[in-house]
Image (cartoon, helix red, strand yellow):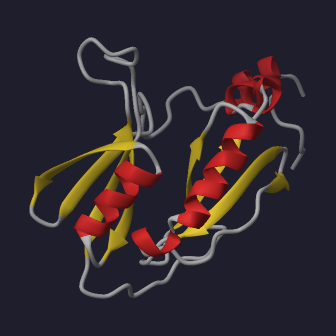
Amino acid sequence: MTAVQQVADIVAEPIIQPTSIVCGTFVTKDLSRARRMCENVLGLECVSPEPGVLLARERGHKPGEALHGKPYWVLEARQADTIDVPQEMLNHWGVLVESQAAVDEAHKRVDAAKAEYGLGRVQKPRFRHGSYAFYFVDADSNWWEVEYRTHELLYTSIRDRGDQVKD
């Protein structure tokens, strides 16, 4: 089945007609700690719009910056008294970096900063599911992936190839 055939199989009028995916949520017992980790470790830009809420996105969307006006994901952190459902590695958030060397450098620096940011396990970088990456867990059991993908493995390229598995 080609990508063109797949498009023909898509429902003409889905129930919801989204323009983009915009957010995901994770919980933390300490918003200040989560903000420090998001800004200083993951390189995200954060804002606290109301008590108990932190919003994070990649940098570069402010007026005059390269990504201004372009769509972006927002990660929403919610303050919680307890973490009722600890997360597993397969339920993780991720950031892309520009090279395999950037993954290695990030790993070295994250591993060295574990105590400073209250991080738990920091796995070694390796090739998985077609990318080079490592995972680490924060103090609230949220898992994070730092990943490099070649152009052929970017999600847009994968999507352009269409389904590779038949039902």
Looking at the image, residue 22 sits to the left or right of residue 4; the answer is: left
Q: Nearer the viewer, residue 116 or 44?
A: 116
The residue positioned farthest toward the front in the image shown: 112
The location of residue 12, given as percent across then percent down, is 56, 26
User: Which residue shows up at 41% across the image and 70% down it?
Assistant: 116
The residue drawn where x is 87% and y is 50% is: 167
Q: Quadrant of the N terminus?
A: top right
Residue 120 screen position, x and y as percent: 55, 78
Q: Position of residue 96 (x, y in %)?
A: 61, 39
Question: Up-down: is 149 above or below 56?
Answer: above
Q: Quadrant of residue 61?
A: top left
**Compared with residue 19, is residue 116 higher up or lower down, i.e. above or below?**
below
> Can see residue 24?
no
Q: Nearer the viewer, residue 93 or 64?
A: 64
> At 73% across and 51% down in the image, what residue appears?
133
Residue 139 vs residue 65: left or right? Answer: right
The quadrant holding residue 34 is bottom left
Q: Nearer the viewer, residue 33 or 95?
A: 33
Question: Residue 40: image x %, image y %?
Answer: 39, 51
Of the pair 16 and 162, the residue shown nearer to us: 162
- Tell me what residue is drawn at x 56 percent, y 60 percent: 110
Q: In the figure, is residue 50 to the left or right of 128?
A: left
Is residue 79 depicted above or below 37 in this figure?
below
Note whether residue 19 is visible: yes
Q: Quadrant of residue 8?
A: top right
Question: Is 4 positioned to the left or the right of 97 in the image?
Answer: right
